[in-house]
Image (cartoon, rainbow, N blue to C red):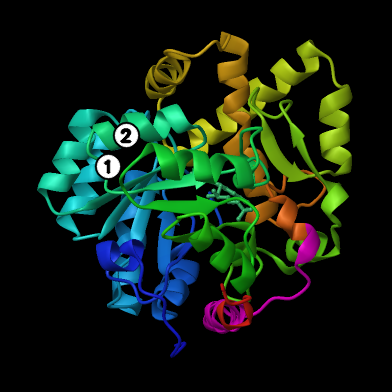
Amino acid sequence: MSDVTLATPLTALVGVRHPVVQTGMGWVAGPRLVSATANAGALGILASATMTVDQLRSAVREVKSRTDAPFGVNLRADAGDAAERARIIIDEGVRVASFALAPSRELIARLKDAGVVVIPSIGARRHAEKVAAWGADAVIVQGGEGGGHTGSVATTVLLPQVVDAVDIPVVAAGGFHDGRGLVAALAYGAAGVAMGTRFLLTSDSTVPDAVKARYLAAAVGDVTVTTKVDGLPHRMLRTELVDALERAGRAASLLRAVRHARAFRRESGMGWSRMVRDGLAMKHGKDLTWSQVLLAANTPMLLKASMVDGRTDLGVMASGQVAGLIDDLPSCAELVDRVMTEALATLRALPAAR
Ligand SMILES: Cc1cc2nc3c(=O)[nH]c(=O)nc-3n(C[C@H](O)[C@H](O)[C@H](O)COP(=O)(O)O)c2cc1C
């Protein structure tokens, strides 16, 4: 583990050595990646939206068997079984609960009462203000260059805006991969950086080699945003599949969505009634049609096809623009050590103020 440390409000809050977070990525952030990150002194977050409740419990236990360091679990606040998942987090003594969408005030209170640190991910200032007012301990703010579902405002604009708006620690995400980025984020007032794509591209990540090779070969311009997978802006590698989805008409997209919804139902053990309830929750307060909600069922299966099955032709490869700057597969220990060493060298090389 790196000897170099930078103590920040994030390291104090969570009890990790380094102000670096590996984010919860569906099908990617499993026990192996999370425990390798934790053992490297950073905060690893398990992705649970693509796991059943039983799989989540055994994944949490597997991480605990591999490390004594703190780690987190990412969950969907709008999932019908979010309360059950929160119960596992509390019962198993998981340090951090991370959310893809803003959790309710009640859920935040329940987790905090049990001593869990609550860190929602947000993509807009007003969401940060809302969860801060509801008692969240910190936020991860993702700028538009980040991978997966993403907004349109760049990290360099969104981050200072959020830092100025809330009093809790802010962790910067979207476009980070090295020590210079960590120093830049700290200069903006962040308490650390959270990285998705960079941790996907490590030797500890279980993503198949053929898929990693596609990311390594990508240039910045090969990373695009499309709404054609699930109706929401989604950043991923541009592939033949993405081009086909963009060309496809509405009827073909809907048919594909129904097929994938059926597959996800089988895979996740979710009944149709649970899927409809989750769909209703997803629709709530948003301007989504039912066909868009159904399209959303596409995402987990399309991501699984690449991240688990290695099908670069059939699956989508969610990715930040930063994939265009990454060309190696270090272990998590090497990566965290490199980021911290480079951060320190960057700090030392900054011009002195007069
Ligand atoms: C393959 C992949 C899957 C992702 N899945 C999720 C997810 O399930 N939940 C979530 O909150 N964010 C998810 N994200 C977003 C990441 O957690 C993170 O916020 C983002 O990757 C940060 O930007 P970066 O890729 O530039 O580091 C995913 C990102 C990628 C690349």
Label 1–label 2 contact, CB within 8 A: yes
Out of 38 and 165, give the one closest to the viewer: 165
Residue 316 image position (x, y, % from top left)? 72, 43
Local secondary structure at mark 1: loop
Q: Mark 2 points at which residue?
A: 131
Q: Residue at image x 42%, y 37%?
A: 269
- Would residue 127 appear left or right of 302 to someone viewing this image? left
Residue type, numbered disc 2: Val
Label located before the other in sequence (1 or 2):
2
Residue 242 image position (x, y, % from top left)? 82, 36
- Against 348, is 130 above or below? above
Residue 53 on the magenta span: no
On-image quarter of the N terminus: bottom left
Out of 107 and 48, give the one closest to the viewer: 107
Residue 183's label in the rendered image is none
- Would residue 155 appear left or right of 110 to someone viewing this image? right
Q: Residue at image x 44%, y 80%?
A: 40
Q: Mark 1 points at which residue?
A: 136
- Would residue 324 appear left or right of 118 to someone viewing this image? right
Out of 111 and 84, give the one closest to the viewer: 111
Residue 16 image position (x, y, % from top left)? 33, 72
Q: Is the magenta stretch mostly helix, strand or loop?
A: helix
- Against 38, is 246 above or below? above
Residue segment shown in magenta:
324-346
